[in-house]
Amino acid sequence: MEARPEVLVGSIDQGTTSTRFIIYDGDADAISSHQMEFTQPEAGWVEHDPMEILESVRVCMNKAMEKASDDGYNVFNGGIKTIGITNQRETTVVWSKSTGLPLYNAIVWMDVRTSSICRRLEKELSGGRTHFVETTGLPISTYFSALKILWLMENIDIVRTSIDSGDALFGTIDTWLIWNLTGGSKRGGIHVTDCSNASRTMLMNLNTLLWDKSTLAQLGIPSTILPKIITNSELIGEITTGWPLSGISIAGCLGDQHSAMLGQLCRKGQAKCTYGTGAFILLNTGEEVVQSHHGLLSTISYKLGPGAPTNYALEGSIAIAGAAVQWLRDGMGIIQSASEIEEMANSVENTGGVYFVPAFNGLFAPWWRDDARGICIGLTRFTSKGHIARAVLESMCFQVKDVLKSMHQDAKDHGDEDKGNEEEFFLRVDGGATVNNLLMQIQADILGDPVFRPADTETTALGAAYAAGLAMGVWTEDKIFLGEGKKKAKVFQPNMDEERRDNKYASWQKAVSRTFDLSDLSL
């Protein structure tokens, strides 16, 4: 078959439960992809093997390239112009500069082993839990990388001694991948992170986009282990020999939620929700840091080049979304595969008064209660599997409503609300769970606003491809943003009446309140 002449762009999407490599053509349509899951913890601490993650990236790149080649695309001889990287955020790796080997497993974003460190810092620091919010946009929480670094320094001897000897490097998963892809210990790997991932460490100054010296000093984290902070769209380096696509440039890098913001083409005032293991809602606030007074985080949206303006965002992070469906499958055996939940939930007209709150490891935004634990209430002898399945789907949607309610409140405080009189608010959605039409309809009903699902729901990978393609001249910003409406999307309109919506939401909030202070119950 004759090779096709298109300029292609690749995207590494390294997520919490799986890795993918997707290849896009000049119209930003996916022409090939490969995905593989990797080992997850069975119980206790949430850790990943950084070496297994590297191997999953290698396999996915090779397999996707083979598929594209079989379809006639030129992927082995220069057809792929550049690649971008997007990744699970906050997950923390510390490795040896000299050997290239991890000094400990990667501590995953949802891990809560740092709870005692958080409580200690809240007592020691004058500002308590919000001590670093003005500088970094983030409260003291188990969620962020800085606390994971402290745990490693305090509990893993080889980490402490390697830091003292100058042999340790820290990075989130983007940094770990780039360092290895560009040479590692043998060929001088490039030690960088992008501003979006850096904004999730609790160590970066949101205004300067530099590591904050005062924060580092107060936490006792040495700057010598930290990577250089770069923008989301710029030439980073070339892939080294021994990897697929050797010699090809890496030119885009964003944390997964920021990448989805770009993939969804969210400009100021527009919001998206990505449904994955957790759910993550971001509202682009433009070129200004907006401090939340309603339980949200201030963060980066994207910065598309060294000379480009920085777009900021308000974010609400939900720890458990799709993971609740996995629990229903693996923990309870109520379904045999994740796809079954839609049919089972559709077998009943409502939840029968059942409310499920998946506070398995506490609650993130807007509650920030690490003492919360999951509950299922409203059960009767007539409760069926269908009612519970539907309650699990509703739990995702109620949590999204909680976050969006806070976003609207913050926007009103900031004077940005009520432009809804000019244009209708709708929520852009992406991620694997959005294939579930019932989930999307429930979301629209609970919000009372339309839900907009794009033709390509894998916008996380697409955003990284956009960033790399912009840096290397494959696309322009005008071509990307002005082409926003050219691909078909499905819009879910709300059907539920307002009184019923309000009553259900009031019941949900009662259910959430029942989850508080449960972590200390005797087993």
Image (tube, rainbow, N blue to C red):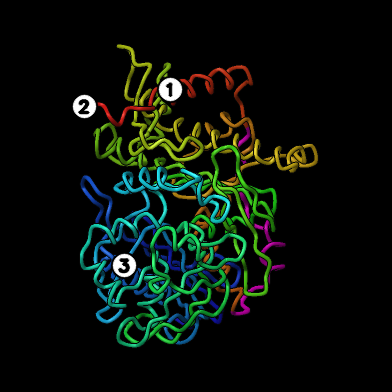
Region rendered in magenta: 472-493
Give the position of the C terminus as an image quadrant.
Answer: top left
For discs 3 and 1, the disc positioned in front in the rendered view: 3
Whether residue 291 is situated above or below residue 351 in the rendered picture: below
Marked residue nearer the N-terminal end (2 or 1): 1
Q: Which residue is mark 1?
A: 511
| Residue type for callout 1 | Ala
The reply to whether the C-beta atoms of the residues labelled 3 and 1 are less than 8 Å apart is no
**Residue 485 magenta:** yes
Viewed as shown, does residue 102 lie left or right of 414? left
Q: CA distance from mark 3 to mark 1?
A: 40 Å
Q: Which residue is mark 2?
A: 522
Q: Secondary structure at mark 3?
A: strand
Local packing at callout 2 (Cα closer than 10 Å; few below 14, some 14-19, many 20+) is: few
Residue at coordinates 34% horizontally, 39% vertically from top-left? 361
- Estimate the x, y position of residue 263 in percent, counting from the top left: 57, 59
Q: Which of 326 and 503 lies nearest the eye of the viewer?
A: 503
Label at residue 94: 3
- Estimate the x, y position of residue 422 in percent, counting from the top left: 80, 41
For discs 2 and 1, the disc positioned in front in the rendered view: 2
Local packing at callout 3 (Cα closer than 10 Å; few below 14, some 14-19, many 20+) is: many
| Residue type for callout 2 | Ser
Q: Which of 416 and 240 lies nearest the eye of the viewer?
A: 416
**Residue 80 visible in the picture:** yes
- In the displayed orientation, state which residue is furthest to the right: 422
Q: CA distance from mark 2 to mark 1?
A: 21 Å
Whether residue 168 is situated above or below residue 511 in the rendered picture: below
Give the position of the N terminus as an image quadrant.
Answer: bottom left
**Residue 434 visible in the picture:** no
Q: CA distance from mark 3 to mark 2?
A: 35 Å
| Residue type for callout 3 | Val
Marked residue nearer the N-terminal end (3 or 2): 3
